[in-house]
Every structure is written in structure tokens, then in C-alpha cells.
Image (cartoon, grey):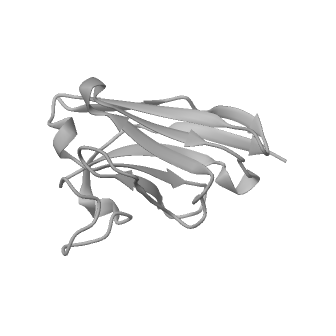
Amino acid sequence: QVQVVESGGGSVQAGGSLRLSCTASEFNFAGRAMAWFRQAPGKEREGISCINGGGGRGDYADSVKGRFTISRDDAKNSLTLQMNSLKPEDAAMYYCAAGRYRYCSDSSGSWFLPPRYNYWGQGTQVTVSS
């Protein structure tokens, strides 16, 4: 059974840092793009970052570019999101998602579209106080 599990959320003050982790089991992790999404109360789920199967620099939402860094370790089936210079508007439930395809984006769609991902974790909460 496929499992995607996030960890590392918590509460920090604005300007602080958090490191989110995601582990996945029972599927071809290295062959899939992996992404982070977030959803704040009353808002739509928002794509934060994606990294191709096999690695690379990653794609980022403008709202987090320069502050967040995505990375993966295919040998450990793990995905990480390093979040620095956190702002109150970063507060949300963060979700790890496993893509249907190797690449974050291609001719069939862009990385920030939720239907491109078919396995999701339960989420980890991030709270940022001002």
C-alpha cells in the first residue's frame, strides 16, 4: 500500500526556519516528480515547489522563491523542504505529493496543478507568529 507521510511542521516566529520531511513507500519514488503544496483555511490548495524524479533545482512558487529549498534523496525515498525567513502568510497545512510523471511540468500540464499528483500525505501544520 502506498504511503506518503510528512513530518517537521510546528510553530515558529516570523523570520524563523523549519524543515519539512516526507517519506514515501511502495512505489517508484525515483521515477516520480515530488512536490509540496499548502492550504490555508478558506483558501485553495497552492503549489509551493516541485522537483523532478532523479533530482534537479526544482520549481518554486513566486511567493516562496529565494526562501524555500526543495531536495530529495531517492536512495531513502525522502523529500525535504527547507523553509527560511518564514512569514505569517506561510502558515498553512503543508502536503507532500507524489507525481504521476517523472517531470514536474511537460506538455500535458504544469507542476502546480494538483491533478498531476496521485498520492498525497495527510499534511503537517506550519504556524508562523508575527
- In the picture, the quarter occupied by the N terminus is top left
Q: Is residue 129 left or right of residue 41?
A: right
Residue 58: quarter of image: bottom left
Please say if 87 is above or below 80.
below
> Farthest bottom residue?
107
- Kindly identify the residue that appears in the image at 57 percent across and 60 percent down: 65
Q: Is residue 38 left or right of residue 54?
A: right
Total number of numbered discs in the rendering: 0
Q: Residue 7, percent across and down? A: 49, 28
Q: Residue 88, percent across and down? A: 75, 52
> Farthest top residue?
76
- Kindly identify the residue that appears in the image at 40 percent across and 32 percent down: 22
> Farthest right residue?
130
Q: Residue 25, percent across and down? A: 23, 27
Q: In the depicted view, which residue is nearer to us: 125 or 86?
A: 86
Please say if 101 is above or below 83.
below
Q: In the depicted view, which residue is nearer to us: 62 or 122?
A: 62
Q: Residue 92, percent across and down? A: 60, 49
Q: Is residue 116 left or right of residue 127?
A: left
Q: In the depicted view, which residue is nearer to us: 92 or 62?
A: 62
Residue 42: quarter of image: bottom right
